[in-house]
Every structure is written in structure tokens, then in C-alpha cells.
Image: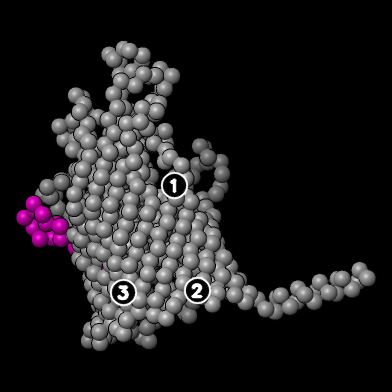
């Protein structure tokens, strides 16, 4: 009897295995990057190894993606840290996908992709960015979030929904890292105002296929991916104001996004475009500030004397337009135009009579206009560099696509209150040679140029990034 059960179990297992499919693919990547100025290594994390495993059984698909992220140890003497490990294992995606007669359902850790332009879409905001991989493309520079998504298909229409009960933020470089773009400040965890309740994020979109392309509408509601200055509290030891301290408070604004996008195919040319309107507000008010304790020695500075929440409310928009065409000699041309601007800004003031010490900002009371330090918490990643940019890319392949050359540039064309049409630029030249079907060597050169006469001086983004001009090479094996 026991033998029969074993035989039946083996038979059922064989059937299950015969109906399922497994697919494996990934890469092994050895990377080197060094500054042009002095040849020193730029120590940033990169994905040394990646593996995607897909399991399919009838209408059910399980998709997973793993990566080993490598970064050179800060010190190699094993004096402060005895661990030999210099890598992290990252579960980038793991979700279940169910196909039905009306569409599909996903649940798990998912990298979401919204929008129509290839890069820099203001609509592509569901999954946060990993700023260490800002110069990568596609999903390589994004992070998965625990969420669910539903797509419904009907004739030429598609409707999608997404939901996450978790507040998801960008992965931003630390202050000591070699990354060229720094945050204006690096607050401590106890300086943040916690989000009340469950920080639910949700969105939906609808698209319609046309004879020469498609058009789509998107809506999303969530908390910002980047933190903001929420206000300040002034504490003292009991009623004694002679030794008061200013407690700087940070939080995440509540933001609603409404976007539209399109793809148009006209002859050999392709037009793509995404535009988004953002309404964002700081939900912290006087009551929440009054409930807060000092983040610095709360047992000593136990008396709140003044409370100044900013209560920001801002409307802004971002747009990215893209044009693609094949030029003579099989040269692929791609051009983008990006613009971002604040439509209106409202907030309370900070009526303080002494300078506020915000690390890395060095702002005096007279200069502390909250509008000047407003940073969008959603939108395209390029918005941290400039409010207007033109991006041009030329690509040519020869030798049966065994050898590829690519010339690209990002031009800062935000020349408001500036006497030059192009304040700064990023120029890149890349070549890729396929040694075999699976083995590729890439060599790249990137030059970043700012302007010492820019009105922002040393704070101008491309001036800060000039030292990131670099030479890079990597050998990548795909399997």
C-alpha cells in the first residue's frame, strides 16, 4: 500500500513537472571606473552578478531577479571590520503573475514601469530610483516595491491598477560616497516626523491604441520619494529660554500626480511624450508639531516654546518629449527635451531671529526662503540636475552589429538669469565590442563641464559633478 502511494506521488510530480517551464538568464560583469583628473578609482556599488529565474505553470508565472552588488572595501587592513565580505545580495524582484481571460494580476516585489519615453519620464514614478545607478538605463536604475498590480484588456483599451501599503523612497547616496550628486542635507532618523497611519500608495492608468500609436492617462497618489524640510520647533530646559535649541524637522509630503502620454509612429519617425502635473502638500500641522519631542536630548530640552510648521503646498509640472529616426548610413538618432517648473508655491514662514544650522546648506535667516530650497519628491531623475535639458544620442553599429559606437550628450539649457545658452553639459562616448555571442567588452569616456561664472557658483550641479568626469570599462558575460 505504501509502495502504491509512493508510485502515485511520483506520477503526480512527474505530471506537474511536465506541465511547467523554467527559464534562467543573467550576467557576470567586471567593472572599472576611474577619474580623468587624477586616475583615482571611483568607488561606487555595481552589480557584479545578476540572475533571473522564471517559473511558468499553465496560467501562473513566478518571476524572480537576484543581484550581487559589489563595492570595494573602504579599508583593507581588517582593523575596524574583520568581515571579508565586500558584496550584498539584493532580491530585486519576486512576484507571482496570474493570466486570465480578461487580463493579468501581479503580487509581490515588483519593478513597475510607467510612461512612454525611453528615459527621464515624469510619469514613471511608481518604483523609486536607485541613484547609485542614475546613469544606467531602464529598470536597472529602479527598485522593486512590495505591491500588487492588475491589468485589464478590452479591445483597444487597457486599464491598470497598482497598490502598495508601504511608503517607498529613493535610494540616495551617503555623504561620504564618491557619487557626484549629493543631497542638500543628511538628517538623522530621529529628525523625521513619522507618517500617521498606513502610508498607502495607489494609482491607475488607462490607454487606448490608435491607428498610428497610442495615448494614455495616469494617476498616482502617494508620499514623496525624497524628504522635505517640514519646519522647526524651539525647545528649552523648562521655562528657561536662555539655552534654547532649534529642532529641524523633516518629513515626506503627500503628492497627487496626473499625467498624460503618447506614442506616435509616422513613417520612419517615432514621437513619444510624457507630461505630468504634481500637487504636493505637507500634511504636518501645529497639532503634530506640538506632540513631538525634541530630537536632541529630549529629557533635558523638554519644554516646547515655539513651533513653526511650513505647511508647504506646491503645484509643479514636468514634461519629456522624445524624437527618434534613422539617419543616413544606418545611424540611429534619439533626441529628448525635458522641462520642469513650479507653477505656484505656498508655505508659512520661519520667523526666527537666529541662523538655522542645516548641514551643507549654510543658509542664514535672511536667505531662508522655503521656496528657494523646494525639491520635488516625484518626477524624472533628471530633475535633480536642471529645470531644462536637451539630450542627444547618435548610435552606429558595424561588422554585422559586432561593434557599436554611441555618442550622447546632455545639455543644460536652463539659462534663466544667465548670459550663456548652455551653462553646462555632459558628453559621453561609448564603444561596445562583441567578443562572442555572450561576451561583450564596453569602453566609455564621460566629460562633465560646468561654468565657474554660473550664478549658483560652486553650488551649480554640473560644477559639483566636474570631478566625476571619468573613464570606464567592463567585461560582461551574458548567459
Mark 2 Cα shell of 10 Å, populated few (<14), some (14-19), many (≥20): some
Which residues fall within the magenta stretch?
404-423
- The single residue placed furthest to the right in the displayed view is 1
Q: Observer-nearest residue: 344 or 155? A: 155
Work out whether mark 3 precedes mark 2 in sequence or the reverse, and give the earlier one: 2
Residue 443: percent from left, percent from top = 35, 68
Q: Measuring 76% from the left and 73% from the top, which residue is drawn there?
A: 13
Q: Measuring 33% from the left and 71% from the top, which residue is drawn there?
A: 216
User: Is residue 463 in sight in this rendering?
Assistant: no
Residue 77: percent from left, percent from top = 50, 42
Q: In this view, does 263 lie above or below 444?
A: below
Residue 215 occupies which quadrant of the picture? bottom left
Work out whether mark 3 precedes mark 1 in sequence or the reverse, and give the earlier one: 1
Label 3: which secondary element: strand
Q: Answer whether residue 416 is magenta in the image.
A: yes
Residue 385 occupies which quadrant of the picture? bottom left
Q: Answer whether residue 145 is magenta in the image.
A: no
Mark 3–mark 2 distance (CA, rounded to whole Å)? 19 Å
Way the structure is coloured: one colour
Q: Which quadrant is home to the N terminus?
A: bottom right
Residue 360 occupies which quadrant of the picture? top left
Task: State the mark number for residue 215.
Answer: 3
Q: Is residue 196 above or below residue 385?
A: above
Mark 3–mark 1 distance (CA, rounded to whole Å)? 30 Å
In the picture of the structure, the residue carrying the numbered disc 2 is 103
Label 1: which secondary element: loop
Q: Is residue 380 rendered to the left or right of residue 424?
A: right
Task: State the mark number for residue 199.
Answer: 1
Mark 2–mark 1 distance (CA, rounded to whole Å)? 28 Å
Asked if the residues shown at circle 3 and circle 2 are in contact, with their CB atoms under 8 angstroms apart, the answer is no
User: Is residue 202 in sight in this rendering?
Assistant: yes
Amino acid at each position: 500500500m505504501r509502495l502504491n502511494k509512493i508510485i502515485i506521488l511520483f506520477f503526480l510530480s512527474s505530471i506537474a513537472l511536465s506541465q511547467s517551464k523554467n527559464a534562467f538568464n543573467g550576467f557576470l560583469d567586471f567593472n572599472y571606473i576611474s577619474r580623468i583628473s587624477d586616475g583615482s578609482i571611483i568607488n561606487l556599488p555595481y552589480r557584479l552578478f545578476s540572475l533571473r529565474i522564471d517559473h511558468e505553470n499553465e496560467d501562473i508565472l513566478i518571476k524572480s531577479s537576484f543581484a550581487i552588488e559589489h563595492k570595494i572595501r573602504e579599508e583593507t587592513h581588517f582593523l575596524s571590520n574583520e568581515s571579508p565580505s565586500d558584496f550584498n545580495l539584493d532580491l530585486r524582484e519576486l512576484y507571482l503573475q496570474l493570466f486570465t481571460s480578461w487580463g493579468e494580476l501581479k503580487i509581490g516585489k515588483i519593478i513597475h514601469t510607467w510612461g512612454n519615453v525611453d528615459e527621464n519620464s515624469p510619469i514613471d514614478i511608481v518604483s523609486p530610483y536607485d541613484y547609485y545607478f542614475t546613469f544606467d538605463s531602464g529598470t536597472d536604475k529602479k527598485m522593486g516595491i512590495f505591491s500588487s498590480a492588475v491589468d485589464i484588456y478590452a479591445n483597444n483599451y487597457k486599464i491598470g491598477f497598482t497598490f502598495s501599503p508601504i511608503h517607498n523612497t529613493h535610494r540616495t547616496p551617503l555623504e561620504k560616497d564618491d557619487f557626484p550628486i549629493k543631497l542638500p542635507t543628511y538628517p538623522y532618523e530621529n529628525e523625521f516626523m513619522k507618517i500617521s497611519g498606513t502610508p498607502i500608495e495607489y494609482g491607475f492608468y488607462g490607454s487606448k491604441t490608435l491607428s498610428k500609436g497610442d495615448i494614455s492617462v495616469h494617476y498616482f497618489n502617494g508620499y514623496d520619494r525624497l524628504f522635505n524640510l517640514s519646519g522647526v520647533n524651539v525647545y528649552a530646559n523648562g521655562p528657561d529660554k536662555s539655552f534654547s535649541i532649534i529642532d529641524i524637522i523633516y518629513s515626506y509630503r503627500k503628492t497627487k500626480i496626473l499625467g498624460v502620454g503618447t506614442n506616435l509612429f509616422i513613417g520612419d519617425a517615432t514621437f513619444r511624450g510624457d507630461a505630468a502635473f504634481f500637487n504636493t502638500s505637507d500634511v504636518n500641522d501645529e497639532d503634530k508639531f506640538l506632540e513631538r519631542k525634541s530630537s536632541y536630548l529630549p529629557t533635558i530640552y523638554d519644554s516646547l516654546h515655539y513651533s513653526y510648521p511650513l505647511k508647504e503646498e506646491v503645484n509643479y509640472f514636468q514634461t519629456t518629449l522624445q524624437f527618434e529616426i534613422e539617419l543616413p548610413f544606418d545611424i540611429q538618432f534619439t533626441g529628448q527635451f525635458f522641462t520642469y517648473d513650479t507653477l505656484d508655491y505656498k508655505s508659512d514662514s520661519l520667523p526666527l531671529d537666529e541662523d538655522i544650522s542645516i548641514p551643507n546648506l549654510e543658509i542664514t535667516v535672511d536667505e531662508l526662503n522655503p521656496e528657494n530650497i523646494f525639491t520635488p519628491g516625484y518626477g524624472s531623475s533628471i530633475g535633480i540636475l536642471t529645470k531644462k535639458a536637451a539630450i542627444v544620442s547618435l548610435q552606429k553599429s558595424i561588422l554585422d552589429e559586432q561593434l557599436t559606437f554611441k555618442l550622447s550628450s546632455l545639455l543644460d539649457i536652463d539659462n534663466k538669469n544667465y548670459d550663456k545658452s548652455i551653462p553646462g553639459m555632459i558628453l559621453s562616448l561609448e564603444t561596445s565590442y562583441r567578443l562572442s555571442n555572450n561576451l561583450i567588452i564596453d569602453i566609455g569616456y564621460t566629460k562633465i563641464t560646468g561654468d565657474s561664472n554660473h550664478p549658483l557658483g560652486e553650488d551649480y550641479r554640473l560644477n559639483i559633478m566636474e570631478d566625476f568626469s571619468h573613464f570606464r570599462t567592463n567585461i560582461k558575460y551574458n548567459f
